[in-house]
Image: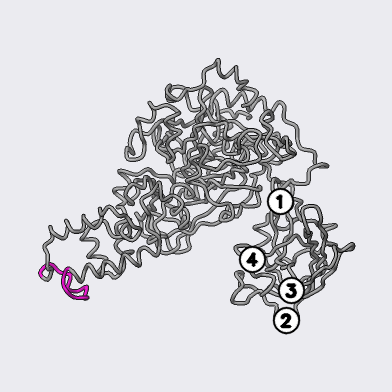
Amino acid sequence: MLRLTAVEVAAATVLLSCAATATADESNKCLLYLAESTIPNAGLGIFTGVPVEEGKILGRVGDAAFPTVDQDWHVSPAKSMLSKHSGDYHWPLTNYDWNADVIGMDDVAKDVSVTVSGFGAALNCHFALLNVDEHVPTYDAAGLDRYTSPGAGAITPWWNRTSTALRDIAAGSELYVDYGPSWFTSRDGHFQLVPLASSYEKALEFLKAYGKMLVGTDSPDDLVEDKMMIGDEVQKDLWDIIKTHPYVSRERQALPETHKDGIRAIKAGDIMTVEVENSIRSLEYLEEHGKCVDNIVPQQSTIPHAGRGAFATRVIPKGGLVAPAPLVHIADKSKTKMYAETKGPTGNIIRDEEKVVHKQIILNYCFGHPNSTLLLFPYSSNVVYINHHSTEYNAKVRWTNDFNSFHHKDWLEKSVDFLEDQWTAGLMLEYVATRDIQSGEEVFIDYGEEWQKAWDEHVKKWEPTSKESDYNNLTWWTEKRETGNGDPITAYELNNDQDIPIRTWAEQQTNPYPHSLRMRCYANTNHDAAYLFTPKTTPVYRRPFDEDVDMAMDGEEYHMADCQVRERYERGEDDSSDDSSDDNEYQITHKHLYVVEIDVEKTVDDVTSFHEHYIMTDVPWSAIKFMEKPYTSDIFLKNAFRHEIKLPDEIFPKSWMNFSEEQKQKAKWYELW
């Protein structure tokens, strides 16, 4: 990585300060705080420092997303075609990851899970209080072209996954996102039957019966002290018995924590009203006991080939907090290795243990140490954008000295074997300023001598990908779009831009879509036609598109097939194929219909197959989808840089140094890492 002098850094700061100041001066208030959750035993939570209207963005910018691809296969047993179950190896990020289809990243690779920093990892779920709507990230490689930059593939291009308010949110409120019921039901052994949305309805029914028992009537207005049939102390004892009954249920867990809150819920006719009040912390509390996560924001870095960097949104004095960094620990960094394929003894595809071809992208964002197998991923908002500078750094990391309810200081004296048995986060670093940092100035830390040497060696050996042989480059298409010579280039953008006609096959010969995309159509190719013999030629079926048939679900999936547009024509005035029907999720009227062609391979048995060809007319825009081809992102470049950030010797616990120099040499550590 090229180094900047102090003068160059200062000059870059002045140039960038105009853009950053507009954001910073918008309000000097901290927009978001990290503090202890209002949910008992839930660890940390994110709280808003200002009121937020429904539909408005929370914070200043969205978060970064990190795909982990085909991991079960890459850590599968040696010489086996079978994958381990995710519980068979230590990867606590499993508890923080999102399903790729929810993030819009399921086409990144065959098997994908996605870690999202900030809101994607730090928010809790409370089904009675959901107030955050999360969106999909944007694909943008921040100008790192695989033909010109050694930084290509070294950063995640998925960023700015924004979160917006589902409803008006009061200042001081804890923020909650929907994990989905299965996240909890699949972890009943780890959590004490967390209440689902339906649990609160049944809990309210119980509360009404409880209230009637107290006063002998169904009227909430009678729930006053002089009408109670039992005294306050007896009520408290009775409520304690109810809440601590040995037979746990989700409905019981949905009941308010105290008997007084139970009566308040009966009077309000809604448990949510009480839960909302209890989920709000005062701004004074957050200032004293929380940590602001709004001090930095991502922008284009001043460091060449670094992509984005983190810039101060306000003045941070020397010794002041830049950002808190709760950590997810990974006991064995070798679990980030990605292997080449080879054939097993029976012809099955297995991993070649002698050939490590890559490592997961998340490695570049983790702290580690040359003498340890441990990795630490900081999941607070925007800290992943803090770049390296070996001489002009203005911040450093240290262990937090508070947040004792979350940060287990005793873990710093435990072994890596102990940490391998811990499946939830329990450690926290802090980024602090080593000198005054001005608003709009980029924040740097020192990644360590090992990282610098690895980067210098990478730059020395780096050679660009050949344009002639590269069909997967997204950066080139991004440049075309930015110069006004190209249309949207990601599947997400194309699928949401209904104003642009879909190009026909003939048009694509001179104006192609990115090679990283494929076109898929909703089409039910199951039919009643029976073949007496396997066809020797390709049967051709021509029919109009039928929404009831072609867009119907087959179990949990839709019928979809690769397709190509052959013709495009405008709708007639009386055309009934309308994308704006009540059942259509897009609620728009696209002015074109299409003729698409589809080739389908069908199997007769294990060795016999044949093809069918379909020509479908009157196909609406909503039935044609673009999808990313797997493994085409820059993160899969074989020459992309990978290296952990070194946690400084002075704060890295000796008890975690489980890899001696002798062992490192014996295992050919440097060749593999």
Which mark is drawn over residue 491?
none
Answer whether residue 433 is magenta in the image.
no
Q: How far, Cα to Cα, is label 4 from label 1?
A: 23 Å
In this view, the mark in front (1 or 3): 3
Q: Disc 3 marks which amino acid?
A: Phe
State the image coordinates of residue 39 (x, y, percent, origin top left). Answer: 33, 51
The answer to whether residue 132 of the structure is visible from this angle is yes
* Res. 31 visible in picture: no
**N-terminal-most mark, 1 or 2:** 2
What kind of residue is marked 4?
Asp
Residues at badges 1 and 3 in contact (C-beta under 8 Å)? no
Q: Which of these two is toward me, 206 or 304?
A: 206
Q: Is residue 279 above or below residue 345?
A: below
Q: Earlier in the sequence, mark 1 or mark 3?
A: 3
The residue that label 1 is drawn on is: 629
Q: Nearer the viewer, residue 353 or 36?
A: 353
Instruction: Give the Cα separation between the discs numbered 1 and 2.
Output: 34 Å
- Residue 217 lies in magenta, yes or no? yes
4 or 2: tag closer to the N-terminus:
4
Which residue matches tag 2? 575
What kind of residue is marked 1?
Lys
| Nearest the eye: 467 or 630 | 630
Point out the stretch of residues depicted in magenta. 214-226
- Residue 303, image quadrant: top right
Q: Nearer the viewer, mark 4 or mark 1?
A: 4
CA separation, marks 3 and 2? 13 Å
Residue occupied by mark 4:
554
Q: Position of residue 605 (x, y in %)?
A: 77, 56
